[in-house]
Amino acid sequence: VAAAMHLICTLSTLVVLLLSLCIPTSLAEGCPFKSRGGDLEGNIDGVPCPRGKLRRRLSSLVNDQATKERISDILLARVTSDASSLSSAHYVGTHRSLQEASGCVTFAAYENLHVDIAALANAIADTRDRGHFLGGIVRLAAHDFMDFDVTAAGNQLGSDGCIDFLHPANAGLSDLWCDDSEACPLKALHDGPYAFMSRADFWVAAANAVIRTTSINNQVILPFHWGRNDRDPNAAGGSECAASSSRLPAESGCSEVEAVFLDRMGLSWRDAVALLGAHTLGRGDAAFSGHDGAWVDTDEETVIFDKRFYEEVMRRSWFPRTTTNPAGDEIQNWSWGGANRPDPVMMLNTDICLKFDIPEGAAPACCTDTTGNCRGNFDDVQCPTADRVRPEAVSAFDEFIGGDNLNNGNNDPFYGAFVTAWEQATENGHAGSLSPLVESCLPVEPTPNPTASPVEAPISSSPTNTLTTQPTPAPIPTSPSPTNTVTTAQPNADFFCNDAITGIIDKNGNTRDCAWVI
């Protein structure tokens, strides 16, 4: 019966996904991409679109037929592969029921998600759109955990699957998380084969996949524990998710970095500098934040997770510039490129201040390297370094460069610090409530009692100790040099088969029998 129920659910998921792929654009939830026929204000046929729902220009996901077909094939392949796994029908059906009841995440499911994220990224042929997609996934997880406040008793927040997508601080994230399966394949992936995971767990796991598959030789393997519960986005009229946005860092400078990462999240300056290194992925967009450009020098670099962010701060002559956000307000950021540069570049105050001492909230009047080309912007005013005001931040920044030569290729200091900082950031507020990946969601069979007259084992002339080790993920494939193609990790072997169970404990701690599962 359990197997039959699993088959019905799997086929239902497949039908829903097929239908969603055929829904006309006009019926999809939320506002469409500007490139779907909207004007520069996001209006479609004269109907205004709320600014909070404007999306990034991921046009190739919906306008490029080849990209659409590749993404559709990936989503359908994962669902149909689940259906074909019914060769162990009783086991699979029972296991899926337990998985959905507890949110349990297995090694195989986690590895499959890494494979699927890499496949979706590789399906996006447009490099700029791919950078948006990859960087956006990491930003989605980060904006969920950056609202943690260790001092807010009873309302600490953290990774809880609750984001106010209409808040300006989260502008652009709705192009990753919406109910249009063409425009938002990440959410379609979650709602289909990974629906058993909470949003919070899924966002962290997906970001882990991005970091791993875009790091040099796939060498950054982030730890993952599951069990985060989602906050109801409609609770208290949606005010709880809306309130979380007020805890995100503003762009004024390092006082915001200190308030968010150190004072509220309980991290160190070294942790904060490491986490901000993730800006090497993706880019800012004038249509959402008003900050137009990438943190690195080419679109190809925006899909590689390495120490390039720190190198770029030191390699260029950054000067302040004023741009306009969608609300029409003047905002301040930094650039080194000319107006005709094909790939816009930028840094925020919260980036530059990690190395240089710049004023808070006011327009700086200096250039970070007056020996270079400041393009007539404060050519003779050198920005002082922040050694005296933020020595820990500057020390970490210099460490992550990897050596005296900017082009040394040593990512190890940055990678090691990022792993430590990311684990604490994603697990803040969940002490003692998260669980490690498992081989199976089925309960472990009890060990039989010893017989009344045990037989003494013979003594070996060369005794050895046999250690039982925890299962580990599959080996990570390597590549000799970084590319802008995401490497697909290999999934683990199939689950072990186990037929008999006597009962389970659901995620609320209640004992359930087999009839309840079915």
Image (spheres, grey):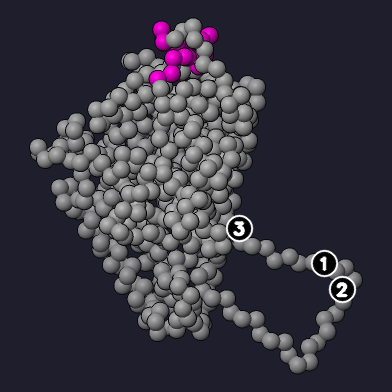
- Report the amino acid beneath label 2: Ser
> In the image, which disc is placed on residue 229?
none
- Report the amino acid beneath label 1: Thr
Residue 299 sits in quarter:
top left
Question: Of marks 3 and 2, which one's residue comes earlier in the chain?
Answer: 2
**Gap in angstroms between the C-alphas marked 2 and 1:** 9 Å
Tell whether position 371 is magenta: yes
**Gap in angstroms between the C-alphas marked 3 and 1:** 23 Å
Question: Could you say where residue 93 lies in the image, as x and y percent from the top left?
Answer: 41, 74
Which residue is at 11% across, 40% downward? 47
Badge 2: residue crowd in 10 Å (few <14, some 14–19, many ≥20): few
Q: Secondary structure at mark 2?
A: loop
- Report the amino acid beneath label 3: Thr
Residues at discs 3 and 1 in contact (Cβ within 8 Å)? no
Q: Is residue 488 above or below residue 364?
A: below
Q: Nearer the viewer, mark 3 or mark 2?
A: 3
Tag 3 residue? 472
> In the image, which disc is placed on residue 464?
1
Residue 85 sits in quarter:
bottom left
- Magenta residues span 363-377
Residues at discs 3 and 2 in contact (Cβ within 8 Å)? no
Which residue is at 41% across, 42% downward? 248
Residues at discs 2 and 1 in contact (Cβ within 8 Å)? yes
Question: Could you say where residue 281 lies in the image, as x and y percent from the top left?
Answer: 45, 35
Q: Is residue 378 visible?
A: yes
Which residue is at 22% across, 58% downward? 19
Question: Could you say where residue 114 lies in the image, as x and y percent from the top left?
Answer: 47, 51
* Magenta segment main secondary structure: loop
Question: Of marks 3 and 1, which one's residue comes earlier in the chain?
Answer: 1
